[in-house]
Amino acid sequence: MFSEKSKSLTGFKFTDYDCIGFDLDNTLSRYKVGAMIEMEYDIMAKFLVEKKGYSKKHLYKPFDHNFILRGLIVDDENGNILRIAPDGYILQAAHGTKMLQDEEIEKYYPRRHWEISDLFVQDPLTTWNGPYSEKMRTLLDYFDIASSLIFARAIDAVDEQKGQKTGKYEVWLDIQAALQDMFNRDNFQTGAGLYFEKMKANPEKYYYKCSDKLLNWLKLLKKQNKSLFLLTGSHVDFASHTATNTVGPNWRDYFDIVVCFAKKPGFFTLKRDFLKLDGVHEGPAVKLDQLEIGGMYTHGNWTDLHKFLTKHLKKDNPKFLYIGDNLVQDIYTPHIHSHCDTVTVCEELEAEGVQGYHERHPDQHFLVSTFWGSYFTCNKADTNWAFLMKKHSKLCVPSLEYVASLPIDHEYEASDV
Ligand SMILES: [Mg+2]
């Protein structure tokens, strides 16, 4: 259901690459996303009610899986949630939980454009940090997707309290505080916050184990002397927990190097030092010539990682590939700033049953939305996310399990892209 046929690139093969990098969360490691999203919603709702004084009536309503959808864009000042086209045109907008009509959209956004989302479509990184990031927030993965419903209900609560739509809202800062409270990396050790405690207490509720087929696919790539690396935003303790519960206790054996807390997309654009690890604690900076095969580090940067792995591969101009699910952190930024080919993992392909994939996702009702419609299209036009995915990745697949069901040297057709 991509509105136009993908670029005519054919012949993509994983075995054409010398070095293949993997994002961990929702890429190599699959989550039981429905259970996790509901859990995240409950934790954030509790935080906003108990710590920030929001109305229970709105925040404690039963979870509405129809409202959430990957890729929603928050306009905090106006209390709106948007979906946009590749040129920034506003396809849909809701104020709180209420969908806006065309004339209402025009009132907020003349000619259906918003200055900040127009900047975003030119370069998503301009709104990632700094002053614009306080006004606009994209909800791109299953760690922050529940925030859209939290935000919309918080706006409904503010409007009800004031008896009108107010001029300017400041709700996002409170939601950001809830996200930070939930995902603060120290919480894994200290037991503060509820998210990591639940993930630790009941891993089988939130993770799928990688199939033997997928593990074998990784082993076959290694046998062909491919260099594999893991590059994740999670800190080392949570990443180890996730990888142990999905890949298995020997997960590190699959990778020549593991980088945790990599702070993507900055990993691809900045020159941060790699830090040595002493258990879960970060130690001193490590120079390029001190990086080791089999090592595990935090922070770091693409330039040094690329040099390190190139040296290890003993090959001129090795070809690099990175596989991830977050379209800004894992796909756009490495492609544009590191000239690295990418593969997008997008579970919605299966949840919506598009491009010939079977509609068989076990948490389909969490990933599809009757409120917004398709993640990929709106009124038959591509969304900005479908555009980004097609423009910046060589291949889009619903999961690595799908890829592992095919031979490692399978040649993908244009329709798979
Ligand atoms: Mg991810």
Image: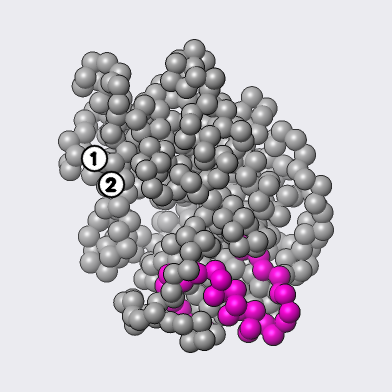
Give yes or no for residue 36 being in the magenta stretch: no
Q: Magenta segment, which residues?
A: 294-323
Q: Residue furthest top?
A: 103
Tell me which residue sits at (52%, 86%) in the image: 289
Residue 274 vs residue 59, the one in the foreground? 274
In contact (CB < 8 Å): disc 1 and disc 2: yes
Q: 54 above or below 264?
A: above
Residue 50: horizontal and vertical position, in percent? 17, 41
Corner quadrant of residue 309: bottom right
Left or right: residue 73 versus residue 38 is right
Relative horizontal placement of residue 124, taking residue 61 as reference (left or right):
right
Tell me the crowding category of disc 2: few under 14, some 14 to 19, or many 20 or more residues within 10 angstroms, Cα based.
many
Q: Give the percent coordinates (x, y) of residue 41.
A: 34, 43
Q: Which residue is mark 1?
A: 48
Instruction: Assess whether residue 321 is covered by the magenta stretch.
Output: yes
Kind of residue sitting beneath label 2 = Ala
Whether residue 64 can be seen here: no
Is 319 in front, or is 243?
319
Instruction: Using a 10 Å C-alpha cutoff, classify the residue at mark 1 as few (fewer than 14 neighbours), some (14 to 19) or many (20 or more).
Output: many
Q: Amino acid at mark 1?
A: Leu
Residue situated in front as seen by the camera: 246 or 28? 28
Query: How many numbered discs?
Result: 2
Determine whether 166 is above or below 234 in the image: above
Please, is residue 69 above or below residue 15 in the view?
A: above
Residue at the location (17% across, 43% down)? 51
Mark 1 or mark 2: which comes first in sequence? Answer: 1
Q: Which residue is mark 2?
A: 178
